[in-house]
Image (spheres, helix red, strand yellow):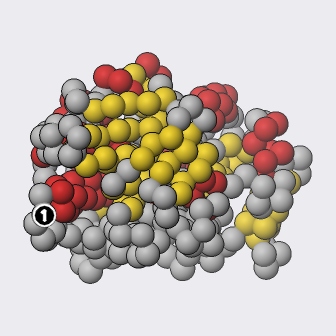
Amino acid sequence: MSGAKQIVIVGGGAGGIMAANRLRKALRADEARITVVERSRTHLYQPGLLTLLFGLDEQDRLSRNMSDLLRGGIDLFFDEVVMIEPTNAVVVGHSGRYRYDYLILATGARLHLDDPEGMREGLEAGKNVFHFYSLDAALKLKGALDRFEGGEIVSSICEMPIKCLAAPVEFILLAESAMKRKGIRHKCHFVFTTPSGSVPPGVEPYASRVAGLLKERGIEVKTQFSPFRVDAGAGICEDFMGIRVAFDLLCIIPPHAGVDVVSGTEGLADPMGWIMCDKNTLRHRSFKNIYALGDAGNFPSGKTASAARQQAAVLAGRITAEVRGEEPTAAYDGNTVCPILTGFDKALFAEFTYSKSLSSARESRFKWFLHVFLLRWLYWRYILRGKFFR
């Protein structure tokens, strides 16, 4: 092991786990020692937070022990990284220092809750302002939806980029279907707002199809709406132009940014904390032994587990080649699969790369079944372990 390269992965989300497992499968123990540093002992299946809201998933199916998800021969340390020293090739945690030859940053995204004004206070009150980016938050929103008896339901994106582009529009489509099931659709008005000029995922032909569905279902759409202030007491969300949207239940998508330890490391990230990497090689533009994948990178692809899966395969291929003194050839083309649930019986899959769309915009019940019932099983059993697909 003395000549083995030290590969350190910071972050045990989907990207970090998939990268670790793929690298362990590709490299012998005498070629590389692989270390994962993660602060949480449990791993959460994030796509399930949205389906949980509408009774399509159960809380106890959404998490597993981190230690059960990694292949043998991977060192796992439960530690919080507080400093990255690229010039010394060291990661510093509360409990230890981790030297690396290759560093993979799978640190994800954090929610910025202090902007727009009033959002944090509304979320903490938990009466009519919610999000679904943690298990506790999703359970609060689920309770509010279950109790809802009529009024204005609003889904609002503060700014881009965000995790899973389609999730906010999925929420409003599923909320409309849920109120129809409850027999109170006629008592409700639905509004979807986005700071972009088109609806998510912002790629054709999917954006046009989703826009058509929103219109067919009587859901009002406000594009180029960037929330500036949330007044939970008055039930008002106001944008920078002074346009106001009233709500009885607001599902707000807070601004996303890179984590503090990344944004606090000089030369590592852009002003929003996203790691500055080549979009094809995933390698940092300045530090040649640092890579990023998943939500943490600034590549212009979707921040989804499907994108992280493809990135993990490319990254494992490139680092394996480098460890063996070969020329890396694997490249990420931006491939992202974005499942969009349009109701309780149909879904469409938007698959695209940096340059083109790959799938049709047709809905089907099979796609709904695949996303709601089969995908989670595949995720735990195969996808995280690098045994499924590319």
Image coordinates of residue 102 in percent, x first then y, are: 33, 55
> Which residue corresponds to mark 1?
325
Kindly give the residue lying farthest to the front in the view shown.
2
Q: In front here: 193 or 216?
A: 193
Q: Is residue 136 visible?
A: yes
Crowd class of label 1 (few under 14; some 14 to 19; many from 20; radius 10 Å): few
Task: Please tell me which residue lies in front, 318 or 49.
Answer: 318
Residue at horizontal 33 percent and vertical 67 percent from the top: 282
Q: Please give left or right for residue 9 compared with residue 108 in the image.
A: left
Q: Position of residue 122 (x, y in %)?
A: 80, 45
The N terminus: image quadrant: top left
Quadrant position of residue 74: top left
Q: Is residue 220 visible?
A: no
Asked whether, in this view, residue 363 is left or right of residue 260, the answer is: left
Q: Please, what secondary structure does the residue beneath circle 1 have?
A: loop
- The residue most toward the top is 60
Measured as percent of width and height from the top left, residue 272 is found at 61, 68
Question: Residue 25 in the image: x percent, y percent?
Answer: 14, 40
Q: Nearer the viewer, residue 5 or 266?
A: 5
Q: Quadrant of residue 18?
A: top left
* Number of numbered discs overlaid on the protein picture: 1
Residue at image position (40%, 35%) is 45
Amino acid type at image mark 1? Gly
Residue in the picture at 76% in, 71% down: 239
